Amino acid sequence: MAGGLAAAGGTLAAGALSMTGSSGMAFAETPKAPTAPRPSTPDEALSELLAGNKRFVRGKLEQPRRDSVRRTEVAQGQAPYAIILTCSDSRLAPEVIFDEGLGDLFIVRVAGNTGADPLIIGSMEYSVVTFGSVLLMVLGHSDCGAVKAAVEVVTQGKTLPGELPAVTDPIAPAVQAVQGQPADQMVDAAIRQNVKMTQDALGQISTFADPVQSGKLKIVGYEYELHSGKVTPV
Ligand SMILES: [Zn+2]
């Protein structure tokens, strides 16, 4: 599979180059070095994400792979190296906080970053099976409204309108697991517990467990802190 992907990457690069050559007028700008080597191992992938997050925190963004050369390249095919399962919260767009570009990340977002729904699981399986993504990051965040709502449902019996229970129900087991915590720490504890439980549950699914077993995939849990912009392992 790795060979196939590498070959596909080579084809993409060659295609982009020949297009540049045959229609030079369309590429008036000087192509920048467009594509860093795609991380091929889970550890390389995690290092790439953490390096990008460090740039984001320091305000030293490179904003890589966002130009027309990259756009042309990935229009012919994608091979995202990492899957990010994160919250829909507007303050943590993955390409921004990891300083990555087009075609790098396969992102599934749902309020509360849970992975209990077949639609969410299937979306991530697609990226593992089809693109050979080597890292799956479950990314929770501080001050998560979905987790706060789940805490209110579990501890105060609050009822929510519409389909909102579909968001909070999968978080409830994480809240129940940390109910012994002091009230002012319960939301933070539930945020981390929810990441851990989601990470563990995904690790039980054979589509992820098998490549994890053979070292081709790693599942990691992180939390994004809204003020600092930093991600830390859970
Ligand atoms: Zn959230």
Image: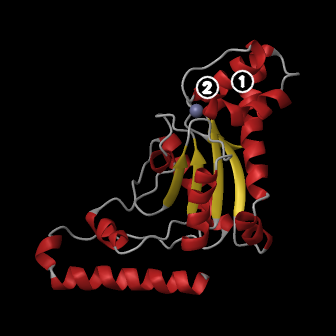
Residue most extreme to the front: 162
**Tag 1: amino acid:** Val
Mark number, residue 49: none
Residue of label 2: 143
**Residue at 58% from the left image edge and 52% from the top image edge:** 119
Decide if residue 9 is in sight here: yes
**Ligand 1 under 8 Å from disc 2 Cβ:** yes
**Residue at 61% from the left image edge and 82% from the top image edge:** 1
Residue of label 1: 187
**Residue at 85% from the left image edge and 31% from the top image edge:** 177
Q: Report the Cα–Cα distance between label 2 and label 1.
A: 8 Å
Residue 164 position by quadrant: top right
Q: Residue 50: give x, y in percent of width and height.
A: 60, 53
| Front residue (pair 155, 196) | 155
Q: Is residue 220 above or below residue 87?
A: below
**Residue at 60% from the left image edge and 59% from the top image edge:** 122
| Front residue (pair 116, 131) | 116
Residues at badges 2 and 1 in contact (C-beta under 8 Å)? yes
Q: How many numbered badges does the structure rendering display?
A: 2
Number of residues whose C-alpha sits closer than 10 Å to that of mark 2, classed few (under 14), some (14–19) or many (20 or more)? some
**Tag 2: amino acid:** Asp
Residue 43 position by quadrant: bottom right
Number of residues whose C-alpha sits closer than 10 Å to that of mark 1, classed few (under 14), some (14–19) or many (20 or more)? many
Q: Residue 105: give x, y in percent of width and height.
A: 50, 58
**Ligand 1 under 8 Å from disc 1 Cβ:** no
The C terminus lies in quadrant = top right
Q: Quadrant of ligand 1?
A: top right
